[in-house]
Amino acid sequence: MTLNSYFDYVILPILTLSVILAFIRLYKGPQIFDRVIALDLIITIGIGIITVYSIRTSQEVFLDIAMILALIAFLGTIAFSFYLEKQNHDD
């Protein structure tokens, strides 16, 4: 089994299944915290998919895009958590 076929038949289906499960959690999440974590997980899985694609096509420029996306996702999660924390203290 070559590395490309391993990516195609093992890694990408697992990542696809995990995105589907994260979308279910995003849709059904009983609290807003669950939805924030699910959205962060979807972005993280997307970064994994970008990384697999970058390795498979030997284009390193996609890794830079994945790092920028990871930074934006991290800052967005921190900002939203700060907002929710501030909202809970005001009540």
Image: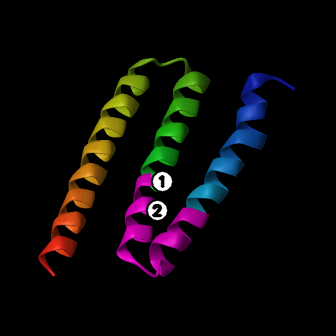
Number of residue marks:
2
Name the amino acid, label 2: Ala
Q: Residue at x 46, y 71 (%)?
A: 26
Q: Quadrant of residue 74?
A: top left
Which amino acid lies under the numbered mark 1 shown in the image of this protein? Leu
Residue placed most toward the observer, 66 or 31 = 31
The image quadrant of residue 19 is bottom right
Tell me which secondary structure the magenta stretch mostly adopts: helix
Residue under the image location 50 percent in, 80 percent down: 28
Q: Secondary structure at mark 2?
A: helix
Identify whether 88 is placed above or below 41. below
Looking at the picture, tell me which residue is in the foreground, 62 or 72: 72
Going 17% across and 72% down the picture, which residue do you hit? 89
Dots 1 and 2: beta carbons under 8 Å? Answer: yes
Q: Which residues are magenta?
A: 21-40
Measuring from the top left, give residue 14's x and y in whole percent. Answer: 70, 49
The label shown at residue 41 is 1
Q: Residue 80 location, x and y as percent? A: 24, 59
Q: Where does residue 5 sit, x and y in percent of width and height?
A: 77, 32
Q: Which residue is mark 2?
A: 38
For label 1, the crowd category at 10 Å Cα-Cα, with few meaning under 14, some 14 to 19 and many 20 or more, is: some
Label 2 Cα crowd, 10 Å radius (few <14 / some 14-19 / many 20+): many
In x, y percent, where is residue 77? 30, 53
